[in-house]
Structure formats: structure tokens, C-alpha cells
């Protein structure tokens, strides 16, 4: 028996190795407007947050008046880059196919972006319609709303939910929801040597590779799958 009745996966940086692409594209688009920020700043301040929150932060912190077409231009450039560069995180397909407990995806990405992303890396059939986005709740991460909404829709007690996140924002959201949170650090934007998390975003453990998931929590694996 598993100690968890549901696993909620973040999408970007967990199922798909997209965060480094997104960060690079945002840095490039802002540079066109004369604002120079680096990938470290993006990771620390924007990772895991919805697009509107990121844009509000840029306006507030830098006093930059973004042109009306900035969002559309950035989104289209990003989706174009995804077409050629986006990859599934190693071992994710095998893990999802072998899951023995229900799972879903909860993401700050837009519905269009997450749908396209999952299709590009071949995860749509495995995930199905169990995708929840920040557009479905009043407050996005780091508020717990999205994770609580997903748990309610999946009819699961939050205390029996495992959240797998990469961002500090997502970790805070999962903790605020009263769930167990593991931080996945196997994406190309982090790595096993990622700095220690601040006290208010400290996960219950780190996951370096999805190849290790069923060794850490064997109860998550379907009994129909070979050991």
C-alpha cells in the first residue's frame, strides 16, 4: 500500500525540460527593450509563477512599461522554440506508465501552452484530461489554491497527496496546501547541486532523477509492473 493516494506533478521543469528555454527567451525579449537580467534572476524570481505575475513583477521592480504586444510576441517565440527544442524529462514516460496510484498535473502555464507541451513530448495519452492550470483558481502559486483544487477534483484528502515540484514558488504552494512536497532537481535549470532551499520553501525531500522514484516510494508503482 502507498502512503499517498494521489501524486500531483508540476509540468514545466518536472515533466518537461522547459524552464531553461523559457528563461532564455524571456531574457532575450526583455533585452530588446533595454532591460538586462540574467538566468539566475529569472530562476529566483519567476520560476513557477504565472505569466501575469511575472509581467506585473517586471513593471513594478524595473518600472518598465511593456508594449501591448509583448505578451503575444513572447508567447509565440517561446512556443516556436518548444517546437524544436522541447524534450521530456528522462524516465518520466516510464514512471507515468507504471504509476499505481492516481496522478494529475497542476501548472502555472496557460492551457494552450501545457496542451502543446504535453503533445510535443508524447505525454498527452498518459496524462489525459487530468490537467489543472492557474486559470482555474483565484490565486496561483505560491497560494495553495491550485493544488487544493486539483485534490478536490481528484477526490483526495490533501494530507494524502504527494506534490512533485521544481520551483520554490511551487514548493511553497504545496506546503501551504498541507501536502507532502518533493523537489525535483533533475531539470537542466537546476541539478543536484542546486542551492539549499530557504526555510519557508523547504521540501520534505529532493528527487534527483525519476529513475529513483519507485525505489524511494515503491508503493506508487503499479502491482502489474515488474519490480
Image (cartoon, rainbow, N blue to C red):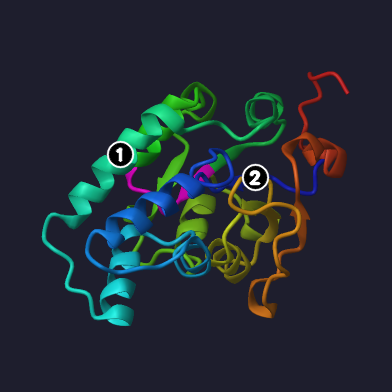
Residue at image location 43% in from the left, 62% down from the top? 49
Compared with 32, 92 (above or below) is: above
- Between residue 101 and residue 209, name the one nearer to us: 209
State the residue position of label 1: 112
Q: Could you say which is closer to the camera, residue 22 or residue 51?
A: 22
In front: label 1 or label 2:
1
Write down the region rendered in magenta. Answer: 105-112
Please report the residue visible at 69 percent of the width from the left and 52 percent of the height from the top: 191
On screen, residue 76 versus residue 217, left or right, reads left
Q: Is residue 171 above or below residue 69?
A: below
- Give neighbour class at mark 1: few <14, some 14-19, many 20+ (Cα, 10 Å): few
Q: Is residue 177 above or below residue 156?
A: below
Q: Is residue 109 magenta?
A: yes
What residue appears at the point 49 percent right and 43 percent down from the top-left corner? 18
The residue at 30%/69% (across/down) is 35
What residue is disc 2 on? 6
The residue positioned farthest toward the left in the image shown: 68
Residue 195: quadrant of the picture: bottom right
Amino acid at each position: 500500500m502507498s502512503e499517498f493516494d494521489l501524486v500531483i506533478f508540476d509540468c514545466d521543469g518536472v515533466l518537461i525540460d522547459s524552464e531553461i528555454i523559457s528563461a532564455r527567451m524571456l531574457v532575450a525579449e526583455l533585452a530588446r527593450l533595454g532591460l538586462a537580467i540574467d538566468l539566475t534572476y529569472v530562476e529566483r524570481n519567476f520560476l513557477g509563477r504565472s505569466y501575469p505575475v511575472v509581467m506585473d513583477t517586471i513593471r513594478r521592480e524595473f518600472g518598465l512599461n511593456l508594449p501591448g504586444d509583448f505578451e503575444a510576441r513572447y508567447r509565440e517565440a517561446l512556443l516556436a522554440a518548444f517546437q524544436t527544442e522541447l524534450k521530456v524529462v528522462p524516465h518520466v514516460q516510464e514512471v507515468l506508465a507504471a504509476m499505481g496510484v492516481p496522478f494529475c498535473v497542476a501548472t502555472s502555464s496557460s492551457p494552450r501552452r501545457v496542451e502543446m507541451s504535453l503533445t510535443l513530448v508524447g505525454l498527452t495519452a498518459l496524462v489525459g484530461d487530468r490537467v489543472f492550470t492557474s486559470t482555474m483558481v483565484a490565486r496561483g502559486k505560491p497560494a495553495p489554491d491550485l493544488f487544493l483544487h486539483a485534490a478536490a477534483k481528484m477526490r483526495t484528502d490533501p494530507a494524502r497527496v504527494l506534490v512533485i515540484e521544481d520551483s520554490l514558488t511551487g514548493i511553497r504552494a504545496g506546503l501551504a496546501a498541507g501536502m507532502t512536497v518533493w523537489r525535483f532537481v533533475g531539470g537542466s535549470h537546476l541539478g543536484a547541486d542546486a542551492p539549499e532551499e530557504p526555510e519557508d520553501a523547504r521540501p520534505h525531500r529532493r528527487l534527483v532523477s525519476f529513475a529513483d522514484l519507485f525505489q524511494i516510494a515503491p508503493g506508487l508503482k503499479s502491482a502489474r509492473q515488474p519490480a
